[in-house]
Image (cartoon, rainbow, N blue to C red):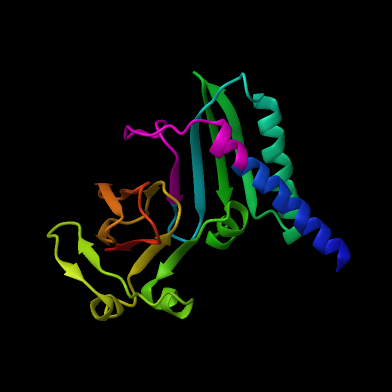
Amino acid sequence: MILKMKTEQSRRSLILLILFVLTFVLCGCSGGDDDYAETVIIVGKKGHVSERIVESFSKDYYDIDELRGEFERSVSEYNESIGSEEIQLRGVDLKDDRVFVNIDFNGPSDYEHFVGESLFVGTVNEAYDNGYTMDVTLKGVEDGDKIGKVQIMGMIDKDIVILSEHSRVRTFRDIAYVSANVDVIGPKEARVLSESDGLAYLLLK
């Protein structure tokens, strides 16, 4: 038990260090709608999650090899604590004063534990069973019509993505309804507004 606690504390320390670096050392890069302009969370049909982090990078404050090493150690520590390879680091690269980090997660729970942000992917019914009460108002992407809990719970078999991170999101199916803190930028893409608070909801068709 003591060994397990020490491993968990070590993993969390590494994750916090990475988040500190990305938040305070690297200047956030936003704007643009191509794959290489901003950070994007990619949600797969079977719950697979990928994150492509894109940030401005100043060599005066941090070395790319050090940053890569921190990610590699943190991912390795997490996988060892789980006992299987639930996270894969696809790359940490520097190009044109921007750093690109590609990470694959076996599922939303691995994303939550590693990143420290909320993420749910599943049906409305599964979301409700996991404690999401659906006490939220959603707006239709096509017609602007608003729906509440009663209407949402009437679509229990529809897939829904719920997250807390202020990021661009790419889904596996067209988006039908979103919460007020989400800006739809394409049939399968949206952006959680950086100035918003609380969870963001994307109900899929």
The answer to which of 58 and 204 lies nearer the viewer is 58
Q: Residue at point 32% right, 35% down?
A: 33
The answer to which of 72 and 58 lies nearer the viewer is 58
Q: Position of residue 23 (x, y in %)?
A: 54, 39
Q: Quadrant of residue 22?
A: top right
Q: Residue at point 71% right, 29% down?
A: 66
Q: Is residue 186 left or right of residue 131?
A: left
Q: Is residue 50 above or below residue 92?
A: below
Q: Is residue 10 magenta?
A: no
Q: Is residue 5 above or below residue 150?
A: above
Q: Is residue 98 above or below residue 51?
A: above
The magenta region covers 20-42
Q: Quadrant of residue 65?
A: top right
Q: Position of residue 79 (x, y in %)?
A: 72, 54
The prevailing secondary structure element of the residues shown in magenta is: loop
Q: Residue furthest left?
A: 143
Q: Is residue 107 left or right of residue 31?
A: right
Q: Position of residue 105 (x, y in %)?
A: 57, 52
Q: Is residue 154 above or below residue 166?
A: below
Q: Is residue 188 left or right of residue 23?
A: left
Q: Quadrant of residue 181?
A: bottom left
